[in-house]
Amino acid sequence: MILKDFLQNNNNHALTQIRIGIWGGVGSGKSIYLTRLFECLEKSPNYRIAADDKAIEFIQTNKHILDNEKRPGSLLKETDPAMSELEIFRYTITSQSSWFQDVTIVWEFIDASGEFYENPDSNVQVSDGETTYNIIEYLMSCHGIIFLLDPLRILKTEQTKTYRKLLSDLFIEFRRRSRSSVNQKVTPLEQYMAFCVSKVDEEVAKIDGKIVKKTDVTEEEYQRINSEDDRDWLWKAGQNPYDLVTEIMGEDMTTKLSTEYCRVETKPDKREKPHPQNRCNFYAISAFGRYRDERGELCTVFEDIQPQIPNSNSPDAEEEKNTNVWGNQPDWNSAFCNNSNNQESQTSNSSTGFTWEQEEEYSNVPEPNKLIIKEGVPINSFNIIEPLEWLIKGIRKHPPILFSDRQQTSSVQENQKRVRSRSRKRDN
């Protein structure tokens, strides 16, 4: 009887294709995350990944720019919001696990600037010139969504919308379009969602409650940092992903996720186990991680940013080069051993309109105020695959009913009603 129930449960909920999407505003690191995810999946014995030539070319170009093995690496340029058409890259992932061999995971990525993702009303054309895409329609078509949150967004201009405003506008429109009628019962969204704070490897302090990048800290400001946790705030805060997400998007928005838009398991230690009301999880992720130098100190992979290239013979430049108030970095017991899910996290080493543009050849000349990846240092990315795996497990066990599926079900039910009605009329 137990085996029969097990087989019936799995057959009733079987999905042959799982669609995964991504959302991220300006500067959240979507292209870098996708590139690192591709690399991790390639290296993993548990997955196989493939794509068409253009999607592979996108990854290969990004990998070349980021590569720091024999020369300094560089961050990717932000996608130009003025591009008139965009590209859609699709990656097909299959799991080698016996539990998921009958499932195909399709990762669809819109190569668009953050402005496109931030505007729920954006309508843009794909490069074929015929297909029009909208960010809400894209998200509605996905079973699971990874949301990338930039912890440094608050440091942008005053005109930049907060995550509370961005996500509130997004979810209001998301739910409005996900309802088949105004009389339908208001429920949380069906999609599984993973909220991921990116860039947690960067050196970010908190001074008097204000988030400040290391490169913006003066000696006077540094002396005012009393707590060791505040001196390297972002790295330490990543040990509690839920609290970090709450800090970045705002407590009001996090509360709305639980009460309005998502199915959130309130007990952190139960978020790793799939069940129907557990469709939202929280992560702190890094595409680069940190490494230990020859002195055993934990260091960032990025060179110190200089507003301009100084004269190498200048005494002031030499003095500044030797000044390092961030030398003693905290060790997370080899990174993220204790997160809000009470699970030991496995480290993964491993716009309005747009068009495809060929990446420029790499230049060894650094751009002013742009992070440069140190030559030859190890890259220890972490929590790259984990959000995807969590989404897949939950979706496989308890599939969401997407809006298109409900429409199809409603249409079938209406047809069945009409057939029964005609049958009764004939009988009479």
Image (cartoon, grey):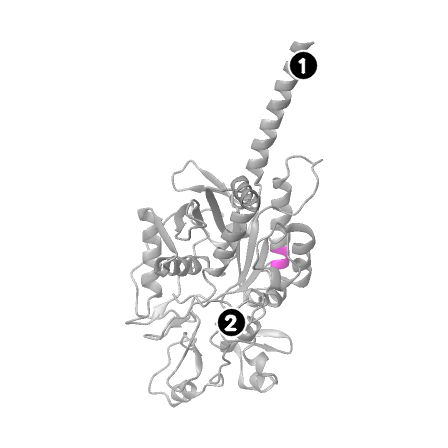
Q: Which residues are magenta?
A: 162-166
- The three-letter amino acid code for the residue at tag 2 is Phe
Secondary structure category for the residue under label 2: loop
- Which quadrant would residue 37 be assigned to in this image? bottom left
Could you tell me if residue 101 is visible in this image?
yes
**Which secondary structure, mark 1?**
helix
Query: Where is the N terminus found, in terms of image quarters?
Result: top right
Q: Nearer the viewer, mark 1 or mark 2?
A: 1
Which residue sits at x=45%, y=68%?
347
**Along the line of sight, which residue is nearer the eye, 272 or 406?**
272
Residue at (58%, 87%) from the top-left corner? 223
Q: Depth check: 188 or 169 in front?
A: 188
Residue 173 spot, x, y in % from top left: 62, 45
* Residue with the mark numbered 2: 336
Q: Tell me, yes or no, whether the two marked residues, 1 and 2, touch with CB atoms within 8 Å.
A: no
Which quadrant of the structure image shows residue 3? top right
Q: Position of residue 205 (x, y in %)?
A: 56, 77
Residue 285: image location, x then y, percent: 49, 65
Q: Categorize mark 1 by other alpha carbons within 10 Å: few (<14), some (14-19), many (20+).
A: few
In the picture, measured across the screen, residue 44 lies left or right of residue 387, that is left
Mark 1–mark 2 Cα distance, whole angstroms, equals 65 Å
Question: Where 18 sits versus 414, above or below?
Answer: below
12 relative position to 109: left or right: right
- Residue 316 shown left or right of residue 157 in the figure: left
Label 2, residues with CA under 10 Å away: few <14, some 14-19, many ≥20: many
Label number found at residue 84 = none
